[in-house]
Image (tube, helix red, strand yellow):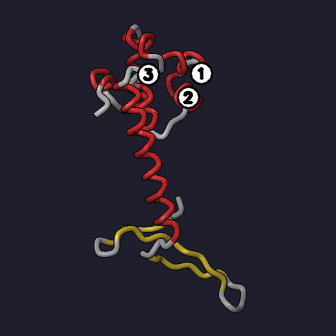
Amino acid sequence: MADIGEFDEKEGYKIIHYSVDDNNNYNSGLKANWGAKEIIVKQSWGIVSERIEAAKQNVRAGKISPIAVHMENCIMDVSLLAKFVELPKWRVKRHLKPSIYKGLSNEIRIKYANAFGLTVEKLDIID
């Protein structure tokens, strides 16, 4: 596997940057300053955090099931989650309804818990 970077305790993660010199030869080197990449990553995580909080508010309001919060935490959509739990997308969408979620069998709850890396008991916990 190719090494794409390393961790330095003083500077954090370093990644390989590639450039072309005056003779059109590729050069590479590890750099700690991610520049624009770091800004993009921070903005992306900000969006993820906002989506998680919105999902939590919707669960508290009884609009959606806790599955939605865990999907956001794992950066999943319905299609990806359906593949993980080996269920059709329409069933996963249906399980996002609080009334349907409450009646899920233990077998289905185990599938969701495994997909999110949780125990079945923690599936209902969103905080």
Q: Residues within 10 Å of mark 2 (few under 14, many from 20)?
A: some
Q: Is residue 73 visible to the viewer in this orientation of the structure? A: no
Marks 1 and 3, Cα distance to the nearest angstrom? Answer: 19 Å
CB under 8 Å between discs 2 and 1: yes
> To which residue does mark 3 refer?
63
Which secondary structure, mark 2?
Answer: helix
Residue drawn 55% across the image and 15% down it: 91
Marks 2 and 3, Cα distance to the nearest angstrom? Answer: 17 Å
Which secondary structure, mark 3?
Answer: loop
Q: Residue 30: where, in percent of width, then height?
A: 47, 76
Which secondary structure, mark 1?
Answer: helix
Q: Residue 64: where, in percent of width, then height?
A: 44, 22
In primary-sequence order, the first of circles 1 and 3 is: 3
- Outermost residue toward the bottom in this view: 22
The C terminus appears in which quarter of the rendering?
Answer: top left
> Disc 3 marks which amino acid?
Lys
